[in-house]
Amino acid sequence: MKSIISWTLRNIPRKYLQLVSHLVMKIYAIFLRGTRVTCPVCRSKFSKFVPYGRLEPRDNALCPNCLALERHRLMYMYLQQKTNFFTDKLKVLHVAPEYCFIDRFEKMKNLDYITADIESPLAKVKMDLHHIPFEDNTFDVVFCNHVLEHVNDDIQCMREMRRVLKPTGWAIMQSPQDWSLATTFEDKTITDPKERERLFKQDDHFRIYGRDYNKRLEQGGWKVTEDKFGVNMPPDQIKRFALPKDEIIYLCQK
């Protein structure tokens, strides 16, 4: 199963996977009936989650019902427990929206919810993150997860998201990090897809962030709070919800 998933993620364009993968997973979910793990996003229970990953698929990662990964489950719990996302009237910009969130957030009556991306068929607004087509101080909340490693100029994109956020707003911009790296590594002269995949984990990545990711966000003008919400969670909950053990939530404000 792991080899099939790895091959699929590496060889089929993401925009096509976004359209059909949920249908395939619904069928696969039948064979994972159980109660050992629970997805906090859709509340479904299974014997285990599906492996997921391009190079080295992770065990117990993908919810076959809503397609939430470890980081999505962690973020959803964070939004529930530590933000006003489910209670206040908010205008939200969601860049590269994840399948597991779209329908749920669109149905929330307290949200004016806008999805945007440069190529995703799931997003309603076609948008280049380097030049966001919205006025200054438009949104209360901005989400942009696992996107900044894909863009040509991440600092410019960070500044654009800050520009469209209201002074009282907040943003979550998670990115994959290599904790063995003290500083972010990027080299735009590397264009060979296989070499980029080896160095940056995917052939469409421009960089791999290190332990300085918070400093990188600060370069984009953000005030950053590092929240170890998941790291400090009880071990039994980390196991039950299959959460990432070392991911820090970066809460960003103007």
Image (spheres, rainbow, N blue to C red):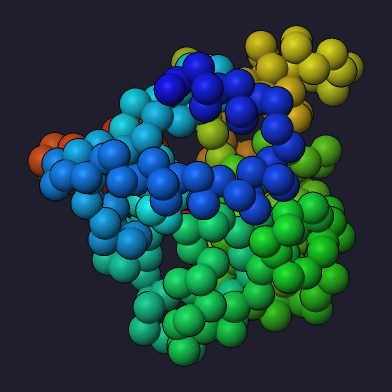
Q: Nearer the viewer, residue 232 or 220?
A: 232
Q: Residue 147 is drawn in which quadrant?
A: top right
The residue at the point 85 percent across, 23 percent down is 188
Residue at horizontal 68 percent and vertical 36 percent from the top:
149
Q: Is residue 25 left or right of residue 244?
A: right
Return the x and y of residue 176 as percentages of the image width and height: 54, 34
Q: Residue at x 34, y 26 (%)?
A: 59
The percent position of residue 36, horizontal first and vertical second, equals: 14, 41
Residue 76 versus residue 27 in the image, above or below: below
| Residue 127 visible to the viewer | yes
Please tell me whether residue 17 is drawn above or below residue 221 in the rendered image.
above
Report whether residue 182 is seen: no
Point 80% across, 78% down: residue: 135
Quadrant for residue 32, please give it. top left
Q: Quadrant of the C terminus?
A: bottom right
Q: In which quarter of the view is residue 130 placed?
A: bottom right
> Residue 160's x, y, as percent?
77, 60
Residue 228 relative to residue 212: left or right = left
